[in-house]
Image (cartoon, coloured by chain):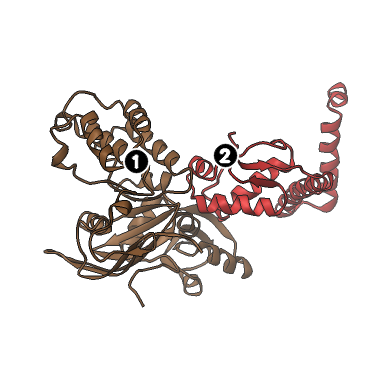
Amino acid sequence: MWIPIQLNENSAEPLYHQIESQLRSLIISGQIKEGTLLPSIREFAGGLNCSVITVRRVYQDLESEGLLRTKQGTGTFVAKVGDSQREVFRREAVEEALNSAVDVGISVKCEEDELKELFLTILHSKYHPDKREGEA
Amino acid sequence: MEEIAIEMKGIEKRMRQKTIGPIDLQLPKGYVIGLIGENGSGKSTLIHMMLKIVFPDQGSISWFGENYKQEIPQHVRRQIGFVSEKSSREEDNLTAEEAAEFRAQWYPEWDQTYFEELLGKFKVPRNIKLKNMSKGERRKYEISAALAPRPKLLLLDEPSSGLDPFAWKLMIDELRSYMESGEATMLLSTHIVDEVKRLADYVLLLHHGKMHGMVEKDSLMDNWKEIWVSGGTDLAGDLPGIIQVQQDVQGVVRMITTECLNTEQILQDSGIPVLKTRTLELDEILSLWLKGHLPAGTQTGKGD
């Protein structure tokens, strides 16, 4: 199983942290299904040019979070993700994206009302794309 | 506790041109340790001492937790695979098959099927004497023959020298899959930085016979970074691990730190924004390290 993880070498974020948060979101978002056999530690490390020490740490962390389970002699599998876990993750992902969008607004000195209006316009156009075309 | 494949304590060896050591090191089981150093830094001598081809003047070595006053006992030596920097003359007049037959008598665990598979993948020519092979072909034979007995410890002295890029890639893949089980330990001496990048878990640096430390590769990559920050060069005084500072443009200072995680934390806590971060290439890190900038918390091997 090939796991789509993209490392950003020019970030101050440590490698294990990047791998862990990406793998966590792939599992919780359901992009990697329950029961999937993950690559061996050496294979995964090889694909990312990182050390087995880092990958082992990621597997251990996610195992203690209940997202992975290891069967002796067979390997590491994706565990069942609970609905509440998925719900929290969904919420957090959206909150995080909105947060950074607002930060951009603040950094270019948008007024609160201006941002609100922009947000509603974008929201409307995304949820009702046809209607907008009709108006134009 | 982690198991140790080889441990050296207070190892010293006086050579004609130089002195190696004192060296203290531990090679943890299951890992690939990339051995880096300039020509003549003592990499081959270090490996030869691990095989008792060269005897140290001082200090002790243990193999899988045991010391041996005399020779390494056969049952232990048979668990060590070795690719020497220069191929041995003894096998010169044999073909790959004949040499394998000879080696198989000595290694009870010799896996002929695996050996044949490797020769096939590497396209090692059959029915010609080893001495008549090209350097790369001979190298591919040596690597196959070192892996065939499935050793617990692999000592590889510049295994890739003479390999074409395709064979090189194949060697990386084969070595990696060999390490898959986690039972084997590999010391890989090399000048190819990419080899370390792709295979190694730890990097061990030797310089003029002295150990400059053994560090987790990812800890190097996480910590040795170039950062750009608003401010002047005076900032560097309050930050850890800064080894280079330069005013870039007006108001922007460029620094190289060996403790990026701490440096960024301090900057963040002081409200100083980091404008840009760049991870150094492994070869840049190695050359700074060779110049004497040691990674934070290094096991320098100088003893206590």
Tell me which amino acid carries mark 1.
Answer: Pro
Same chain? Circles 2 and 1: no
- Chain coloured brown in the rendered structure: B
Horizontally, is B262 left or right of A116 in the view?
A: left
**Which residue is at the front of the view, B80 or B233?**
B80
**Which residue is at the front of the view, B267 or B25?**
B25
- Name the image quarter holding residue B211: bottom left
Tell me which amino acid carries mark 2.
Answer: Pro
- The dot on residue A39 is 2
**Which residue is at the front of the view, B93 or A99?**
B93
- The dot on residue B149 is 1
Q: How many numbered marks appear?
A: 2
Mark 1 burial class by Cα count in 10 Å: few <14, some 14-19, many 20+ = many
- Horizontal and vertical percent for residue A30? 74, 37
**Which residue is at the front of the view, B16 or A88?**
B16
Mark 2 burial class by Cα count in 10 Å: few <14, some 14-19, many 20+ = some
| Viewer-side label of 2, 1 | 1
Whether residue A11 is visible: no
Picture layout, residue B27 above or below residue B197: below
Element under label 2? loop
- Name the image quarter holding residue A25: top right
Q: Residue furthest bottom?
A: B304
**Chain for disc number 1:** B
Whether residue B262 is visible: yes
Element under label 1? loop
Chain A rendered in what hue? red
The quarter of the picture where the C terminus of chain B appears is bottom left
- Horizontal and vertical percent for residue B274? 57, 60
- Horizontal and vertical percent for residue B110? 33, 38
**Chain for disc number 2:** A
- Horizontal and vertical percent for residue B72? 27, 58
C-alpha span from label 2 to label 1: 26 Å
